[in-house]
Amino acid sequence: MSDETLNGAVPAAEAQQPQGPSFTVEKLYMKDLSFEAPNAPQVFNEQGQPDLQMKLSQKVQRLADNAFEVGLGITVTCTLNGKTAYLAEVEQAGVFGLAGFDEQTLDAMLGTQCPNILYPYATAAIGQLITSGGFPPFPMQPINFDALYSENLRQRAEQMAQQQAGGSLLENTEAAGNA
């Protein structure tokens, strides 16, 4: 028999060799979901311009050498005439496999690519909660996670410079970064 590869198939020995960095989406799931309309049904009769506030958060947890859980939290609060009309909260999460990346690239992948994948699922859930609660839809705009990550890097560098200028690390500070 010859060592020819038939029909473009990769020989078994080559198929098992790592081909550089890899990024996989292992699992996507809803980790937390909450909706409150504390002033219903009276709020439906209120007149005025609603005030909408959106908060975004991200959590990263290393599960194994090459596995990470990333959680993207979105909280939308609507107030009308000083009263809370509704509060919708979602934490969309995923398990991601990341292998073969240097620490800086790994941090960037966790801070940009993973939230970009989770965001559409989180916004769909928020939209469903709000309309199911009897309120008009809240169209959520796209988010530039690359820009948010760059700003986070700038803030981390600033904190490090302040700590070095002070001569010692502050107690009870949280670890910076995503990984």
Image: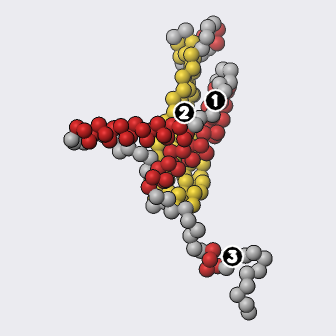
- Label 1 vs 2, first from the N-terminus: 2
Q: Nearer the viewer, residue 129 or 165?
A: 165
Which residue was labeled with disc 2? 74
- Quadrant position of residue 85: top right
Left or right: 155, with 1 as reference point: left
Q: Residue at x 65, y 25 (%)?
A: 138
Specify whether residue 33 is in view: no
Specify whether residue 109 is in view: yes
Residue lying at the far bottom of the rendered structure: 1
Q: Are marks 1 and 2 in contact (CB under 8 Å)?
A: yes
Where residue 38 sits in the image (x, y, percent)? 54, 18
Left or right: 30, with 1 as reference point: left
Name the quarter where the N terminus is drawn.
bottom right
Q: Nearer the viewer, residue 162 or 60?
A: 162
Residue lying at the far top of the rendered structure: 47
Which residue was labeled with disc 3? 10
Mark 3, Cα crowd under 10 Å, few <14 / some 14-19 / many 20+, is few
Where residue 70 sits in the image (x, y, percent)? 51, 47
Left or right: 76, with 104 as reference point: right
Where residue 64 sits in the image (x, y, percent)? 46, 59
The disc label shown at residue 164, or none = none
> Please, what secondary structure does the residue beneath circle 1 have?
loop
Mark 1, Cα crowd under 10 Å, few <14 / some 14-19 / many 20+, is few
Q: Which numbered disc, 1 or 3, marks the residue closer to the eye?
A: 3
Which residue was labeled with disc 1? 140
**Is the residue 119 above or below the residue 81 in the image?**
below
Visual colour scheme: secondary structure
**Is the residue 82 above or below the residue 58 in the image?**
above
At label 2, which amino acid type do we have? Ile
**Is the residue 81 above or below the residue 55 in the image?**
above
